[in-house]
Image (spheres, rainbow, N blue to C red):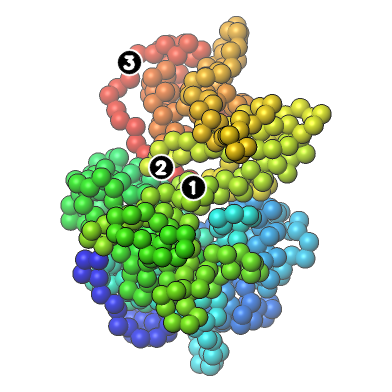
């Protein structure tokens, strides 16, 4: 790896953060929305919240669940758990109920920091004590924490869990990955060679529940830099995210490639203050590298790779070359090892493809309350001392003549969608819990560099009629995160089989409805409002590739994403130019809402035919991104 060096700063992450708070207490540590906290503010507020957590029942070794939107309180909660020796688990407020229940059970959660109006949480049996965010005033916490600053800190082993993140495993139900305090510190420590040590404003285009942001956040807190976090709205609306970066003169950006592609689509908008851009979580393409170099020639680009089980990222390709056919995932960070092995755990020759195994300090503790799954994926290392382990990634890789690793797909049915790991078996299992479904098979289509789509094929249970798509989508929302929801559901009498009797996924992929097929056909009604909605249904079917949209269905819930938002905007511009702004499509997410907006604003033509004067020359801008 080009000029990567190991940082020599001693001590765990908490000590490094507190040292910065002592050295430069008034320096800005965290900025989010209209809140700006100095290092003294953040240190004192986290100490104050740690005291409240102890009073609520949290102890060293227990778990604190943070179920909040992106906020300063959420970051303070993470540091408070670290201070008292508890692990944190960051949960999204829209986490499906089934996953919320499983996570609370797996973690033995002692306290939840959330909101009083969280009906999903209130409806669960044996709900842990709740610390309501509405009652957590940062100034009051800081005042309480300042008075407690002289209390001796508890002795906490670096082998104790630091955090837990729920993620799809290679098979079976989703699992909670446990990472120790020392493992997190080992992951953060060597990054100076890529991130640099000059004063920085580290902007994270990720939610707190994504481990991809932890290295940048704790790197900044360990070195006295500023962490800049977007609100949920700023993260979803790309123009607002860009304004945030420009307003605070961001120097570092951590982002998934699909979102970065959208940010670069609006040429010249990202600030030239950017010195480092880190892409992670998805495939980085040569086209993206070339676009980065063209627009931000002074910014360093780093392509990071690493499953959650290998602590944020375990390899990096520093300054990738756009003139290659495939961008490498690079070389291991100092402290990590990478092995490309055959099915007998023997190293394959350079240039040959094998399964990638990660070893060294970056291998997580394992899965919470899942010893069988842990033993399957975390295996004894034949290359290290007694007790050394390797994590079996399930990723196929090869090492080139220069020693760089290249990703070549999966050994199983796992895919990445908008930065989230999705196991097709999990999606199939969720669909099959519906009483009217006998068997479900999910196939993934589309290029990996864009937003791949999931199509579910299903056979009905004996004597039952297949449920419609909206019913299945409602059912799946109880079990699956948004990225894992199939775009369409296709009933079939029986599944095609291979000669060995297995489901023929290739044959099913060939049956995925093409965009524009099976549009709903409705006779024109004299009522222009009805016809306007019918036209919009046809537009949505063209964009989404299926005709399942009801008047009040959410565009994103039916498989829409940022790239499809741009397609929708272009289609609406062609029919009703200048009527709907691109940025509005994040809020106007139903056919009914779009019909109202178009019907109220249209002029100089007919709303039901879409006849308008030619649109002014314009290029659609990236508007919404769903992490």
Q: Is residue 330 something that shows in the picture?
A: no
Residue that carries the numbered disc 3 in the rendered image: 614
Look at the numbered discs 2 and 3 and tell me whether their residues touch, using CB distance below 8 Å: no
Q: Earlier in the sequence, mark 1 or mark 3?
A: 1
Badge 2 density bin: few <14, some 14–19, many ≥20, Cα 10 Å: some
Q: Residue at x 58, y 13 (%)?
A: 521
Q: Position of residue 553 (x, y in %)?
A: 61, 32
Q: CA distance from mark 2 to mark 3?
A: 35 Å
CA distance separating discs 1 and 3: 41 Å
The residue drawn where x is 37% and y is 70% is 337
Image mark for residue 448:
2
- Whole-angstrom CA distance, mark 2 to mark 1, is 9 Å
311 or 441, which lies in front?
441
Residue 340 point in image, percent of width and height:
38, 61
Question: Which image quarter holds the N terminus?
Answer: bottom left
Q: Nearer the viewer, residue 473 or 579?
A: 473
In the image, residue 241 above or below residue 23: above
Q: Dot 1 corresponds to which residue?
A: 415
Give the quarter of the image for residue 88: bottom right
Q: Nearer the viewer, mark 2 or mark 3?
A: 2
Mark 1 or mark 3, whichever is nearer to me: 1
Q: Dot 3, how many residues are within 10 Å of its Cα: few (below 14), some (14-19), or many (20+)? A: few
Tell me if residue 182 comes above or below residue 31 in the rendering. below
């Amino acid at each position: 790896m080009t000029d990567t060096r190991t940082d020599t700063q001693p001590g765990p992450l908490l000590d490094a953060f507190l040292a910065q708070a002592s050295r430069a207490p008034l320096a800005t540590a965290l900025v989010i929305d209209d809140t700006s906290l100095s290092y003294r503010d953040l240190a004192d507020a986290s100490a104050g919240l740690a005291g409240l957590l102890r009073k609520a029942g949290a102890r060293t070794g227990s778990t604190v669940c943070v179920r909040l939107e992106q906020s300063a309180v959420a970051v303070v909660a993470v540091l408070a758990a670290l201070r008292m020796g508890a692990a944190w688990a960051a949960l999204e407020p829209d986490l499906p109920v089934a996953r919320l229940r499983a996570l609370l059970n797996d973690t033995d959660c002692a306290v939840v920091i959330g909101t009083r109006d969280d009906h999903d949480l209130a409806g669960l049996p044996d709900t842990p004590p709740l610390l309501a965010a509405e009652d957590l005033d940062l100034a009051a916490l800081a005042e309480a924490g300042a008075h407690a600053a002289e209390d001796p800190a508890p002795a906490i082993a670096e082998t104790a869990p630091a955090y837990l993140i729920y993620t799809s495993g290679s098979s079976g139900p989703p699992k909670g990955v446990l990472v120790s305090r020392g493992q997190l510190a080992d992951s953060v420590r060597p990054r100076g060679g890529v991130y640099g040590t000059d004063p920085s404003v580290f902007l994270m285009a990720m939610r707190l529940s994504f481990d991809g942001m932890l290295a940048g956040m704790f790197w900044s807190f360990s070195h006295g830099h500023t962490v800049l976090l977007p609100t949920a709205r700023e993260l979803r609306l790309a123009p607002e995210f860009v304004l945030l970066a420009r307003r605070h003169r961001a120097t570092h950006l951590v982002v998934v490639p699909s979102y970065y592609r959208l940010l670069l689509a609006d040429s010249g908008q990202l600030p030239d203050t950017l010195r480092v851009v880190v892409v992670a979580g998805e495939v980085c393409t040569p086209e993206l590298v070339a676009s980065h170099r063209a627009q931000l020639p002074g910014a360093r680009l780093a392509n990071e790779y690493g499953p959650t089980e290998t602590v944020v990222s375990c390899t990096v390709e520093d300054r990738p070359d756009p003139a290659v056919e495939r961008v490498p995932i690079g070389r291991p960070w100092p402290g990590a090892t990478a092995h490309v092995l055959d099915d007998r755990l023997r190293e394959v020759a350079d240039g040959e493809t094998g399964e990638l195994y990660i070893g060294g300090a970056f291998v997580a503790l394992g899965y919470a309350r899942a010893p069988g799954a842990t033993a399957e994926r975390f295996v004894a290392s034949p290359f290290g001392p007694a007790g050394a382990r390797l994590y079996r990634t399930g990723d196929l890789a090869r090492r080139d003549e220069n020693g760089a690793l290249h990703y070549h797909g999966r050994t199983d049915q796992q895919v990445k969608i908008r930065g989230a790991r999705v196991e097709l078996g999990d999606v199939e299992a969720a669909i099959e819990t519906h009483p009217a479904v006998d068997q479900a098979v999910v196939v993934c289509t589309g290029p990996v560099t864009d937003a791949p789509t999931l199509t579910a094929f299903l056979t009905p249970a004996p004597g039952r009629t297949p449920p419609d798509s909206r019913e299945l989508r409602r059912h799946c929302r109880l079990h699956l995160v948004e990225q894992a929801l199939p775009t369409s559901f296709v009933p079939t009498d029986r599944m095609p089989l291979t000669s060995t009797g297995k489901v023929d996924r290739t044959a099913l992929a060939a049956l995925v409805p093409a965009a524009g097929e099976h549009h709903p056909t409705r006779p024109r009604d004299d009522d222009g409002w009805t016809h306007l909605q019918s036209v919009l249904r046809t537009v949505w079917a063209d964009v989404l590739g299926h005709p399942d949209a009801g008047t009040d269905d959410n565009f994103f819930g039916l498989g829409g994403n940022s790239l499809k938002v741009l397609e929708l905007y272009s289609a609406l511009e062609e029919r009703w130019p200048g009527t709907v702004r691109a940025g509005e499509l994040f809020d106007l997410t139903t056919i009914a809402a779009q019909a109202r907006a178009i019907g109220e604003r249209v002029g100089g033509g007919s709303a039901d035919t879409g006849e308008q004067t030619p649109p002014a020359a314009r290029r659609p801008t990236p508007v919404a991104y769903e992490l």
